[in-house]
Image (tube, rainbow, N blue to C red):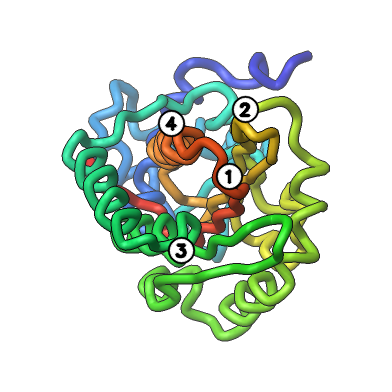
């Protein structure tokens, strides 16, 4: 039986509501909150039973003894594969990014440094960028990570910094997992970089007219806004592809990756 047939439309609505709430609050979600806030057209008993079922099937989990539940890696994977909507980026962000990019390029700033700086400022994430062939990288926005509860512990923060220090050694691992030109999303243990297997990574490859290959990767909490971030990744890829003849880039965006809207 295919996984898409494992849960009903009602269970999908409950799962999507849990993910939406947890994305916004980073707090375990209760059935009572779902009924009150999301006005699901089901009884409290039905929602509770569906959450129990989703937990039993591995789509939700209980982080503590409390009544609240959070999405599991399997739950996020189902959401991405079957329920995720491709969200649009605000035209204000698009115009701002294009104008600022032109300003920086007029100053003869390096494309990888410019893109990292702008994306860090607009997405409130840590961005690291550099050329794949030269192993030369730039980073902006490390302070952005500290705002996320997932990064409040020293251990997780240390894993991230270690991943950055070894990024040149991990590029081949990432490239080996990609197929075609589509954006790929890794959740938790799916992540080819072991230091960040408690997080999610979104990767899209591209090729310049010169034939050089590049990579854009976004790394952040599992509760990131996947639809919006995928749209952002696709737009960044489009901007980079416009730079005919430029050196290939690798962009690593770490943090919550949450844009307005």
Disc 2 secondary structure class: loop
Above-or-below relation of 212 to 126: above
Quarter of the figure with the N terminus: top right
Position of residue 114 relative to residue 249, above or below, is below
- Does residue 129 appear in this view? yes
Mark 1 highlights which residue? Answer: 202
Q: Which residue is drawn at 41% across and 25% down?
A: 85
For label 2, the crowd category at 10 Å Cα-Cα, with few meaning under 14, some 14 to 19 and many 20 or more, is few
Disc nearer the start of the sequence (2/4)? 4
Q: Do the residues labelled 3 and 2 touch (CB within 8 Å)?
A: no
The CA span between labels 2 and 1 is 11 Å
Question: In this picture, is 178 found above or below 86?
Answer: below
Horizontal and vertical percent position of residue 148: 41, 69
Residue to which mark 3 is pinned: 113
Give the structural element (helix, strand or loop) at label 1: strand
**Secondary element at image label 4:** helix
Residue mark closest to the camera, 1 vs 3: 3
Q: Answer with left or right where residue 1 lies relative to residue 78.
A: right
Say which residue label 2 marks. 182
Query: Contact, CB < 8 Å: mark 2 with mark 4?
Result: no
Q: Is residue 48 above or below residue 254?
A: above
Distance Cα–Cα, label 4 vs label 1: 25 Å
Which label lies toward us, 4 or 3? 3
**The C terminus: image quadrant:** top left
- Say which residue label 4 marks: 14
* Local SS, label 3: helix
**First reached walking from the N terminus: tag 4 or tag 3:** 4
> How many residues crowd mark 1 within 10 Å: few (<14), some (14–19), many (20+)?
many
């Amino acid at each position: 039986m295919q996984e898409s047939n494992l849960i009903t439309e009602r269970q999908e609505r409950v799962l999507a509501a849990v993910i939406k709430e947890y994305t916004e609050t980073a707090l375990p979600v209760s059935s009572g909150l779902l009924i009150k806030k999301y006005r699901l057209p089901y009884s409290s008993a039905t929602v509770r039973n569906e959450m129990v079922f989703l937990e039993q099937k591995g789509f939700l989990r209980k982080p503590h003894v409390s009544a609240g539940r959070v999405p599991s890696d399997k739950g996020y994977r189902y959401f991405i594969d079957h329920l995720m909507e491709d969200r649009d980026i605000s035209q204000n962000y698009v115009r701002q990014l294009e104008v600022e990019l032109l300003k920086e390029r007029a100053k003869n700033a390096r494309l990888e440094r410019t893109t990292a700086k702008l994306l860090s400022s607009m997405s409130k994430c840590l961005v690291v960028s550099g050329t794949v062939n030269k192993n030369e990288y730039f980073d902006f926005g490390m302070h952005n990570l500290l705002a996320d509860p997932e990064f409040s512990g020293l251990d997780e923060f240390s894993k991230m910094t270690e991943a950055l220090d070894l990024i040149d050694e991990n590029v081949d691992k990432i490239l080996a997992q990609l197929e075609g030109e589509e954006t790929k999303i890794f959740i938790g243990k799916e992540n080819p970089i072991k230091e960040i297997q408690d997080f999610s990574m979104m990767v899209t490859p591209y090729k310049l007219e010169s034939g050089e290959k590049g990579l854009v990767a976004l790394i952040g909490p599992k509760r990131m806004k996947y639809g919006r971030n995928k749209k952002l990744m696709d737009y960044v890829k489009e901007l980079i592809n416009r730079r005919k003849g430029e050196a290939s880039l690798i962009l690593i965006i770490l943090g919550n990756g949450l844009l307005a809207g």
